[in-house]
Image: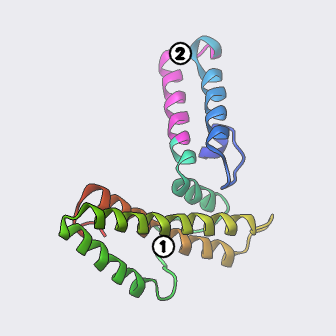
Amino acid sequence: MDAFDRLGVPARFDLSPDQIRRAWLAAAARLHPDRAGAEDQEAASAIAALNAAKAVVEDPERRADALLVRLGGPAREQDKTLPPGFLADILSVREEMEEALASGDPGRSAAAEAMACERREGHIAAVGQMFERLGAAPSAEALQAIRVELNAWRYAERMIEQLRSGGGSAGL
């Protein structure tokens, strides 16, 4: 059972936070030991699995990864392909980010974070559109294209994490 099934939501990228919350509340109520007649350990295990599913589905990047794998696409660990020219582009972006962090200027760091967040939003929108266009029988090429976009999105996420922690280039 994957995160979508466990939570009881449709396997789609465009889920709203309210839709996820309502599904989680309904599932949690069904699993409550007083209602389900389950043993404490069994109920605790079911609730833990439900909470793990909620964590996946409410995070857009993790939700996209889970949906892609569900549809038969490559997992993150299986395919690290990036868009053509991406590494050259990201190198200049990373230099700007490193300079902003090294400057100690909160304004420059905030501007770098805003740029990384803007990139992330672009990836979220692109992935959403790609999932919308898939159709009932997605092609391997379409699923591969989503994986490539998700891999680029991961770079934006890592930049944001680094900027928020005030760290250097470790881990990128």
Identity of the residue furthest to the top in this view: 34
Specify whether 57 is left or right of 85.
right
Which residue in the structure is indicated by mark 1?
152
- At mark 1, the secondary structure is helix
Up-down relation of residue 141 to residue 109 (above or below): below
Residue 76 in view (yes/no) = no
* The C terminus sits in image quarter: bottom left
Q: Earlier in the sequence, mark 2 or mark 1?
A: 2
User: Viewer-proximal residue, 167 or 141?
Assistant: 167
* The N terminus sits in image quarter: top right
Q: Tell me how far mark 2 sits from mark 1, CA to CA.
A: 44 Å
Name the image quarter holding residue 5: top right
- Residue 72 spot, x, y in % from top left: 65, 64
Specify whether 142 is left or right of 156.
right
Residue found at x 24% / y 59%: 166
The main secondary structure of the magenta stretch is: helix
Label 2: how many residues lie within 10 Å, few (<14), some (14-19) or many (20+)?
few
Between tags 2 and 1, which lies in front? 1
Q: Identify the amino acid type marked 1.
A: Ala
Q: Identify the amino acid type marked 2.
A: Glu
Q: Does the magenta segment cover residue 112? A: no
- Residue 16 spot, x, y in % from top left: 65, 45
- Residue 6 spot, x, y in % from top left: 63, 39
Residue found at x 29% / y 67%: 108
Q: Are marks 2 and 1 in contact (CB under 8 Å)?
A: no
Up-down relation of residue 5 to residue 27 (above or below): below
Residue found at x 65% / y 71%: 143
Which residue in the structure is indicated by mark 2?
39
- At mark 2, the secondary structure is loop
> Which residues, given as a range, are shown in magenta?
36-54
Residue 99 in view (yes/no) = yes
